[in-house]
Image (spheres, helix red, strand yellow):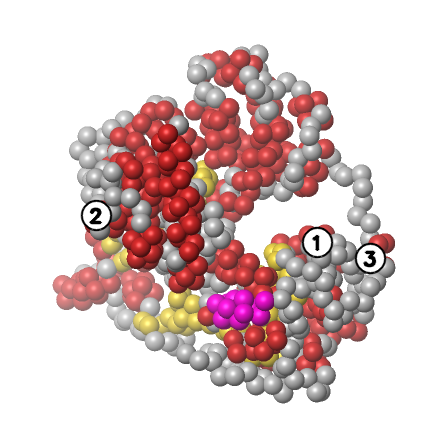
Amino acid sequence: MLPEVELDRLQGRLAENVMHFARVLRQAGLPIGTDRVLLAFDGLRTAGLASRGDLHAILAACFLSRGEHRTLFDQAFHIFWRDPDFLGRIMQMLMPQVKQRVSVPELPQNRRLAAALLGPSTAPVQLSESRIEIDAAFSWSDREQLRKVDFDTMTAEEWAAAQRMLDRLPALSALRATRRTVPAARGRQLDVRAMLRTAARRGGETVMPTWRQRRMRIEPLVVLVDISGSMSRYSRMFLHFMHALVSGRAAANLRVHTFVFGTRLTHITRQLAARDPDEALAAVVNAVDDWSGGTRIAHALHEFNLRWARRVLSTSPTVLLITDGLEHGDTDLLTREAERLSKSCRRLLWLNPLLRYAGFEPKAAGVVALLPHVDALLPVHNLESLDQLITALAYKGERAVIANGVSPAPRSQ
Amino acid sequence: MWVIGYGSVMTAFPASIDATANLLTDHNYVADRPLATAVFLALKLQRPLFLEGEPGTGKTEIAKVLAVALGTELIRLQCYEGLDIHGAAYEWNYAQQMLEIRLAEATGESRERIAQGLFTERFLIERPLLASLRPRETPPVLLIDEIDRADEPFEAYLLEVLADFQITIPEWKTVKAEQPPIVVITSNRTREVHDAVKRRCLYHWVDYPSAARELEILRRRVPDAQQMLSRQIVAFVQELRRIELYKLPGVAETIEWSRALLALDAVVLEPETVNNTLGVLLKYQDDVAKLQGVEAARLIERVRNDALVRGSA
């Protein structure tokens, strides 16, 4: 191992490289502040460097803060600190020319990492391709049609209408009692601490009762949006709606997780968080590969149950499933996954744009499979129906059954 | 399993990563080098250690082993939704205070005296966070377990404690630790903990162990198991972790399963025994159903073949 003194003396170059490494990671999207870099210096000075593995472990402990960043970190580490003769070279202060070293690389597997290491990509995303519209509504293709949709913005009137409705949302959404209390004019619990403070101030003369009650909070939401070809005209509007929801006035109080799925499931909560709606939706389009492709509802639900349910359903939220239910694949799997999903959330609301047709009957195999496991089936084809959705969200009953034209079968316990 | 130790003699902090790894191994915790590094840095830099990972990978165990190994006290705070200051840090003894007021009135004490005497140490009930800051011979290990179960307001409260190792009690004073406790925070990641908390900590993702490490863990924790059986158990569990399951078995499950098989006098893995004891390994009906019968038999077959190949090589 290198003696501490050595390290201190040589610190200049090493520190510089650690800092460059941190910058690469930062550009790749890891939240690494200067404090973490300083911590890494401390760590290196304390632990010393016996091997490349140690350097990896130390930097990981200091730079990482999320499990899902590990892969990215590992890749970046192996590219940045690539040196077969680590111990030999470290005496001459390893890794002198960061830039040179990185510019002769085999391409890193991760697009974000590549962009961070090599600078901004020269090939812009070609949006014009999306102009070639193949109307695949009501047909299903297994193949992903890596198409990127060019979002038009909502018309001004639509936007204003949506905004108005969203302002009403916090008032209407169901509130749930949390396990915390707040001071209240009346309530069930005595606030003894406040009472004694007042008593102490007044010299113990009088002890007046003061109260606390349970704090209320807007129910958490998880939203799963189908973006397959047959759904694309509605999902666009609905994403606008979601963006308005998470960036609106009530956003601070609201916990929403949003996913989109076609042939695969994508978590887009972070992309939606951008302030500007167009920016947010562009970010979503960028993150999603299977826009307007085929749909595999069962697989999407399976993936959700497997990878995400434990992480986003722990607060037992209301789940909005937005799809036309036209699943042409494995309906047995769909039944099983829908049942599991419905059992692990508080309410499962299904929003189906096909309900716009007066004669809609639940005959398609996918619809039949889904229907027994949802608490409500609601239309979602225009702003008016979004209004209905808001009313449904506001419904406080457990396992509410609100149906529009179609009644789901009663849940079997 | 581990007795909460009130150590009389403080073992000095390990001086290097190797020493840390050895210390943990001496107390039957087989840590890989990255984990030993994180622990060593946490001790040296006096930073909280944030351990995240799937359930049953030995996160809580680290805190327990550290307390025993360093010969110091373990203070444990189990998190739950709605955990508040009263449960986590301190509480005033209201009944006593009420009595005090009445008593003081009866003896005709002045109002000022009553006001001054009401919020003092005498009436303070310590909870884990405050207890961990109190002066003692050796800094204790403070285990904040399953922080993902607590809600966001609690995380916000933790920030002060983790950043400065102090707690402000508005009616009384700010309590600051002379020697910061060794803080270990665990999370099963049922939700994302806020970055502000993580930023103050050293982060380590506790992964499922490699086959070699898992075998070593079994050797130490279930010493009665035959080498052959242990090998097969580990190979089987490692194979399981490659299958798409709702809940992959952790090290805790491996240990439990080995004990179960021992209790059933198993010498090698048999399809029938495995089928009957799958409930020890897998905790979802869907997972058990998926594996029962053919799949399990196939896995066992493969595990045995592997063992044969390795045995002859």
User: In front here: A54 or A16?
Assistant: A54
The answer to which image quadrant residue B302 occupies is top left
In this rendering, would A221 be left or right of B2?
Answer: right
User: In front here: B263 or A252?
Assistant: B263
- Tell me: residue A97, above or below residue A38: above
Spatial CA distance of label 1 from label 3 is 13 Å
x and y percentages locating residue B62 in the rendered image: 33, 40
- The residue drawn where x is 39% and y is 52% is B297
Q: Which amino acid is tagged 2?
A: Asp
- Tell me: residue B40, above or below residue A242: above
Residue B58 visible in image? no
- The residue drawn where x is 65% and y is 38% is A109
- Tell me: residue A1, above or below residue A38: above
Q: Are marks 2 and 3 in contact (CB under 8 Å)?
A: no
The numbered mark, 1 or 3, whose residue comes first in the sequence reads: 3
Q: Main secondary structure of the magenta part?
A: helix
Q: Chain of mark 1?
A: A
Spatial CA distance of label 2 from label 3 is 65 Å
Residue position marked by numbered label 3 in the rendering: A130
- The residue drawn where x is 26% and y is 30% is B26
Residue position marked by numbered label 2 in the rendering: B265
Q: Which amino acid is tagged 3?
A: Ser
Q: Chain of mark 3?
A: A
- The residue drawn where x is 37% and y is 76% is A187
Q: Chain of mark 2?
A: B
Between disc 2 and disc 3, the foreground one is 2
Give, as a single range, the part of the protein colored magenta. Answer: A330-342
Q: Are marks 2 and 3 on the same chain?
A: no
Q: Circle 1 — which element?
A: loop
